Image (spheres, coloured by chain):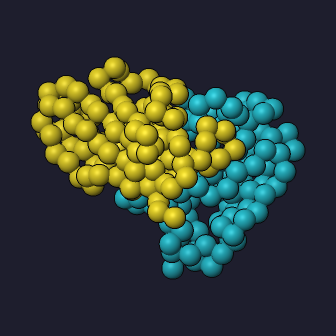
Amino acid sequence: DAKTTQPPSMDCAEGRAANLPCNHSTISGNEYVYWYRQIHSQGPQYIIHGLKNNETNEMASLIITEDRKSSTLILPHATLRDTAVYYCIVRPQGGSEKLVFGKGTKLTVNP
Amino acid sequence: ETGVTQSPTHLIKTRGQQVTLRCSSQSGHNTVSWYQQALGQGPQFIFQYYREEENGRGNFPPRFSGLQFPNYSSELNVNALELDDSALYLCASSRDRASYNEQFFGPGTRLTVL
């Protein structure tokens, strides 16, 4: 079972920041938080991951709370092409690389 | 650098038949994982292959089997197809088993079982 909880859907206006929350209250000390997204009819796409520090790349920023029980993915200037299902995944370190997906958050960016 | 490719893109089979799906991993990647995604659900892990050997398996029956070849491409075989096997089948490759490497997914094969 997925170890994360996400809202089923969110809306965002084009050009605004999209803030997608994720709860992972049972995360272990050596588990990373990963974010993937899946645009309709495509395979999931890696976005970003982090352990305990905030991370930023060209796609998004990841903010992890100090107790690591929750995180927020931030898309700073959402575009229509960011409409997708966003998955927050807690990933075990070492061993098999399987990803345990939940149902994710369907983000709709509106013009 | 080529991405992950899968074939065929779509497939229709009848119940009881067998199917083989193919995946070519991204250049430089030696690990392939397979996932099943039912409509409206997140992908579910089937199994992973690392250097031609199975390296972890999800909660799928033995009629789901796989292979990885020396060039690290992979096949997913499903025997005795059931209606519930209708889904999008995704493969993902990564540079190694180490967990810090993100996986790159292919576009998937849409299997319909009638």
In the image, A108: left or right of B96? Answer: left
Residue furthest to the right: A66
State whether residue B98 appears in this view.
yes
Residue A12 against residue B63 in the figure, above or below:
below
- Location of residue A5 by image quarter: top right
On the image, which quarter does residue B84 sit in?
top left
- Residue at the (56%, 75%) spot, across then down: A79
Question: Residue A68 lies in what quarter of the image?
Answer: top right
Picture layout, residue A20 above or below residue B64: below
Residue B108 shows in the view: no
The one of A14 and A40 positioned closer to us in this rendering: A40
Q: Is residue A86 left or right of residue A42?
A: right
Name the one closer to the observer, A98 or B71: B71
Quarter of the picture containing the C terminus of chain B is: top left
Q: Residue at x 48, y 41 (%)?
A: B32
Q: In the displayed orientation, state which residue is furthest to the top.
A: B62
Tell me if A65 is positioned left or right of B9 in this view: right
How many numbered discs, if any?
Answer: 0
Q: Where residue B43 sits: x, y (%)?
A: 45, 41
Residue at 12%, 36% in the rendered image = B14
Residue A75 against residue A26 in the figure, above or below: below
Residue B4 percent coordinates (x, y): 44, 55
Residue under the point 18% across and 38% down: B113
Q: Position of residue B35 (x, y in %)?
A: 43, 39
Chain A colour as displayed:
cyan
Location of residue B72 in the rendering, given as x and y in whole percent from the top left corner:
45, 43
In the visual, does A11 lie left or right of B46?
right
Which chain corresponds to the colour yellow?
B
**Residue furthest toward the front?**
B70
